[in-house]
């Protein structure tokens, strides 16, 4: 059991803006606190690539991380992580203090492009994750974001027999609510996902959102990327928004499909850290 006492709780924050300077995008006013760092691999013009580093190697019950990123007018940035995030077992008692909490706030200004592409989050047996994503994107901006959850440390033969995931997404486009959804699954998570009407044996899930005036153009490609063995998924597009969702008993198969989907929508390969 993880001790969630106040002295053992980790608190981390990252915040940064991104500004267009000539043909390049540069970071503005980065702020780092706790165990998180922002690294900027060298790029030769064009979009900026920023990498989130968790120096703690994972998160446990009672830990909290808050991220805030803004792409100013005309800027182009891709945000990713060095590796999969790991959420370890939380305390079995104690309520809210046993949860691992993550907050993400993204703002995409006029004519800007922001890709939020963290690698997958692996939930260990007993993990309790509460996550919130709040996004503001202008009508003429582009936002591409993807999140993938893996339920259990499958490489060690571990099923997620207990735990809870609460995931809240709010996306506003041009000041209007464009997408709102909440996921809440708890208890015997693996058992619930085994039910045909819920997961059909899934051990990983992913959601991709593309907010863009070109979103409808990517619908056929998104559906084709998900039409592969061991992956059940679908995609829809409306009012400048494309949403794709997928499940799989194989995290590897799902990751491969999501990489293909994202690469197709971006028109270029994902950051090298995804390789």
Image (cartoon, rainbow, N blue to C red):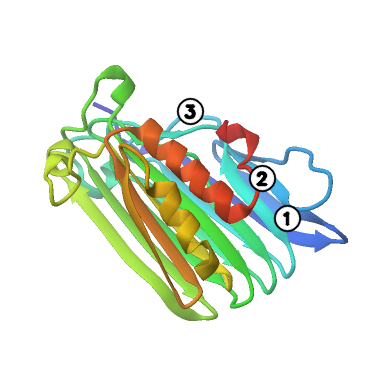
Count of numbered badges drawn on the protein = 3
Q: Secondary structure at mark 1?
A: strand
Mark nearer the viewer, 1 or 3: 3
| Residue matched to label 2 | 50
Q: Are marks 2 and 3 in contact (CB under 8 Å)?
A: no
Residue 100, position as x, y percentages in the image: 34, 43
How far, Cα to Cα, is label 2 from label 3?
A: 18 Å
Residue 258, position as x, y percentages in the image: 46, 44
How far, Cα to Cα, is label 1 from label 3?
A: 25 Å
Quick one: label 1 or label 3, which is nearer the N terminus?
Answer: 1
| Residue matched to label 3 | 57
Return the residue nearer the eye: 89 or 251. 251
**Could you tell whether 17 is left or right of 153 in the image?**
right
Q: Secondary structure at mark 2?
A: strand
Q: Is residue 149 above or below residue 28?
A: above
Residue 23, position as x, y percentages in the image: 85, 58
Residue at the image point whose x is 35% and y is 42% from the top:
149
Residue at the image point whose x is 20% and y is 49% from the top:
185
């Amino acid at each position: 059991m993880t001790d969630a006492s106040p002295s053992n709780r980790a608190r981390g924050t990252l915040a940064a803006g991104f500004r267009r300077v000539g043909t390049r995008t540069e970071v503005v006013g980065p702020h780092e606190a706790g165990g998180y760092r922002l690294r900027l691999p060298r790029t030769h013009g064009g979009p900026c690539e920023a990498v989130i580093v968790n120096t703690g190697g994972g998160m446990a019950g009672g830990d909290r991380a808050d991220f805030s990123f803004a792409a100013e007018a005309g800027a182009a940035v891709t945000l990713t992580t060095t590796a999969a995030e790991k959420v370890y077992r939380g305390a079995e008692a104690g309520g809210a203090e046993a949860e691992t909490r993550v907050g993400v706030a993204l703002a995409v200004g006029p004519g800007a492009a922001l890709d939020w592409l963290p690698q997958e989050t692996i939930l260990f047996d007993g993990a309790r994750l509460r996550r919130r994503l709040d996004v503001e994107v202008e009508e003429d901006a582009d936002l591409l974001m993807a999140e993938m959850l893996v339920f259990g440390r499958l490489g060690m033969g571990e099923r997620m027999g207990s735990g809870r995931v609460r995931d809240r997404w709010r996306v506003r486009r041009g000041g209007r609510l464009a997408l709102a959804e909440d996921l809440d699954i708890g208890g015997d998570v693996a058992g619930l996902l085994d039910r045909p009407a819920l997961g059909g044996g899934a051990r990983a899930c992913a959601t991709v959102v593309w907010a863009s005036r070109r979103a409808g153009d990517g619908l056929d490609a998104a559906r084709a990327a998900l039409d592969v063995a061991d992956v059940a998924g679908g995609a829809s597009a409306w009012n400048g928004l494309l949403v794709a969702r997928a499940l799989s008993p194989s995290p590897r198969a799902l990751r491969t499909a999501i990489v293909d989907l994202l690469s197709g929508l971006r028109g270029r390969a994902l950051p090298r850290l995804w390789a």
